[in-house]
Image: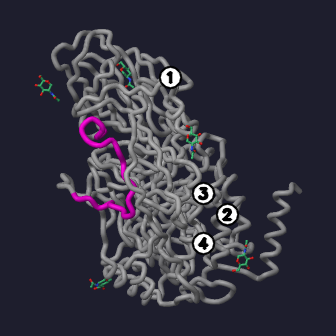
Amino acid sequence: MPLLQMEHAVVFLLGLCTGRSFGIDYDSNCFVKDGKPFRYISGSIHYSRVPSYYWKDRLLKMKMAGLDAIQTYVPWNYHEPQMGTYDFFGGKDLEYFLQLANDTGLLVILRAGPYICAEWDMGGLPAWLLEKKSVVLRSSDSDYLEAVERWMSVLLPKMRPYLYQNGGPIIMVQVENEYGSYFACDYNYLRFLLKLFRLHLGDEVVLFTTDGASQFHLKCGALQGLYATVDFAPGGNVTAAFLAQRNSEPKGPLVNSEFYTGWLDHWGHRHSVVPAQTIAKTLNEILACGANVNLYMFIGGTNFAYWNGANMPYMPQPTSYDYDAPLSEAGDLTEKYFALREVIGMLPEGLIPPTTPKFAYGKVCLQKASTVLEVLDGLSPSGPVRSTYPLTFVELKQYFGYVLYRTTLPKNCVEPTPLSSPLNGVHDRAYVSVNGVPQGILERDKSLKINITGQAGANLDILVENMGRVNFGRYNNDFKGLVSNLTLAQDILVGWEIYPLDIDGAVNSDFFYLLDHPKRSAVKALSYEVPAFYTGTLSIPGGIPDLPQDTYVNFPGWTKGQIWINGFNLGRYWPARGPQLTLYVPRNVLVASVPNNITVLELERSPCSTQACEIEFVDEPNINYFFVFPLPPVACLSLRPR
Ligand SMILES: *[C@@H]1O[C@H](CO)[C@@H](O)[C@H](O)[C@H]1NC(C)=O
Ligand SMILES: *[C@@H]1O[C@H](CO)[C@@H](O)[C@H](O)[C@H]1NC(C)=O
Ligand SMILES: *[C@@H]1O[C@H](CO)[C@@H](O)[C@H](O)[C@H]1NC(C)=O
Ligand SMILES: *[C@@H]1O[C@H](CO)[C@@H](O)[C@H](O)[C@H]1NC(C)=O
Ligand SMILES: *[C@@H]1O[C@H](CO)[C@@H](O)[C@H](O)[C@H]1NC(C)=O
């Protein structure tokens, strides 16, 4: 027997000897743990949104709120970045996270996917699935199933030793997510998953589904053999919601798998806030029914790097996933935390870990290092791909970040000439320049046409940003880049040189710090500038104990871009659209011994020509900046009655 299998067998036998068991008692309408009736109060934390440095702190705060369990999603695209390449190291060490949960005395409800929604890029599905252009995701499409089967045969065997009956914390495993909200309604797909999960996890573990609390959602979401649970928001009719679950499960425990403690945000819309009293009241009602509940989110955390998702019509979610949850993005104890802790009531002995201190390091001067165009060759080690018509990110095998599309003007454009994307194919935002002179911005669903000027033969450069793939609904097949032709006046532009950009790789090798002659081209006060990199260093002051501490970075006068500290990609900033102004900087990305290297990619307009060229480290977040927003917020799950 191979070593790995043998270990599993031993763990499994130990489980049998310790008599640990978890299951459903249908006649008593409850779960049973170790032979006794059991009801859980759980909270959601996504390990992919909290630095591993802070996992223990956040889990302990959850335990001290009186929770029995945590619930987490497994984002497939986080662990299999390229087909067949798996990453479970460092911040992606799911087994270590499970071990910490167990050590903290928390049970785990695992939402294993393959699809998770979660306001996460493409709902957790890897973008490389789109290499088959016509793939029908979340269905019995044979290529999709093959990829799922391979992934689950890596993930689930790792999870098996952590099942409760095998001595670990996992009491239940969710299959798919809100499948009843998806158009495909493919029962064979759910049956395939059921069989696959049973094959790898055994017959004992409780497998379940989660859907909106209505017959409409449960119709395609529930399947014989998977225990059907529901999700619903505070403020509604709890009895009616659970009656919907009873339609699918006439007997067994009542479960709300996503009881919303707050709500998600989108760039350009107001920050969502849900009062603690509303949540406390409905939570009381749920508990009075004897029901099980998971608070979604208990801590939301951060969409670092490029991990945010988007809704349709195209609305990407910001970097902060604070969610107005009981623990803030930075893990701070809030009023809501204490209000819900009171409702939960069953408080464990011990001290609640305090809110971590934040430090205002102050202003940091930045200097322009170079424009994107000036260092194109350094950013694109593979060099350009030539193509008559534009290629998508997936065709270039680059899944995140930025790609530069270059062609030449086929004719003189002395008068302003319309450059347009007639099929709305700029996914998602394009920064346009001609021979280095900025022309304007195209944006998916928002700005499909700009005027440009320039001489025949001049370089037309279009830097395209992937702002996050749609995570919900039928628009999941979200191709990025220029996904349809651009036209200049009436003519389709051809003859492209397409530069895949490895900006993260360049930042990580201190590329911008090692530039021989930093190119400080004169910055003119235009309404747009070409995308450019700025660098600076933050030194942690001496003589103050316990530094570095957490902080927030503010972007006064900056417009939109991406920021890295010591190579760590903190995410996107976009104060010009809001509501998020500051980005959370966890202390683990900072060092006290040497200056911290900061790299900023500003895509539109820096303050450097008119104001101070600086960013500022402050000790309070501001994710609730209010502009006069043009559109009402549209929710991820807008189909659901709330
Ligand atoms: C998990 O914690 C329980 C005690 O709550 C312990 O009996 C069990 O051995 C732990 N499992 C692992 C895998 O550490
Ligand atoms: C809640 O729903 C139940 C079941 O549909 C219904 O009997 C009850 O009247 C509703 N309560 C309120 C306050 O609407
Ligand atoms: C483009 O230029 C033309 C002619 O100057 C003008 O009428 C039109 O409004 C401009 N369009 C845009 C999108 O700026
Ligand atoms: C661009 O237009 C050409 C010619 O009409 C067409 O063959 C091609 O498929 C188009 N490409 C894209 C990406 O739409
Ligand atoms: C910052 O970049 C320099 C290269 O200019 C490098 O020597 C140094 O180690 C970097 N600092 C950190 C904290 O990574």
Where does ligand 3 appear, by image quarter? top left
Mark 3: few/some/many CA within 10 Å (<14, 14-19, 20+): many
Q: Which residue is mark 2?
A: 96
Foreground mark, 3 or 4, reads: 4
Where does residue 274 sit, x and y in percent of width and height?
31, 72
The image quadrant of residue 529 is top left
The residue lying at 50 percent from left, 59 percent from top is 586
Secondary structure category for the residue under label 2: helix
Q: CA distance from mark 2 to mark 3?
A: 26 Å
Asked if 57 appears above or below 310 in the picture, the reply is below
Residue placed under numbered mark 3 in the picture: 193
Q: Among all residues in the image, which is located at the extreme right? A: 1
Please name which of the two marks, 2 or 3, marks the residue nearer to the observer.
Answer: 2
Distance between the alpha carbons at the discs numbered 3 and 4 = 20 Å
Viewer-proximal residue, 410 or 291? 410
> In the image, is residue 611 part of the stretch drawn in magenta?
yes
Name the residue that disc number 4 marks. Answer: 108
Instruction: Decide if ligand 1 comes within 8 Å of the CB at mark 3.
Output: no
Front residue of 34/504: it is 504
Instruction: Verify CB contact (< 8 Å) between mark 2 and mark 3.
Output: no
N-terminal of the pair, mark 2 or mark 3, is 2
Q: Which residues are magenta?
A: 606-626
Q: Secondary structure at mark 3?
A: helix
Q: Residues within 10 Å of mark 1 (few under 14, many from 20)?
A: some
Residue at position x 27%, y 52% in the image: 268
Q: Position of residue 467 (x, y in %)?
A: 39, 43
In the picture of the structure, the residue carrying the numbered disc 1 is 377
Q: Amino acid at mark 3?
A: Leu
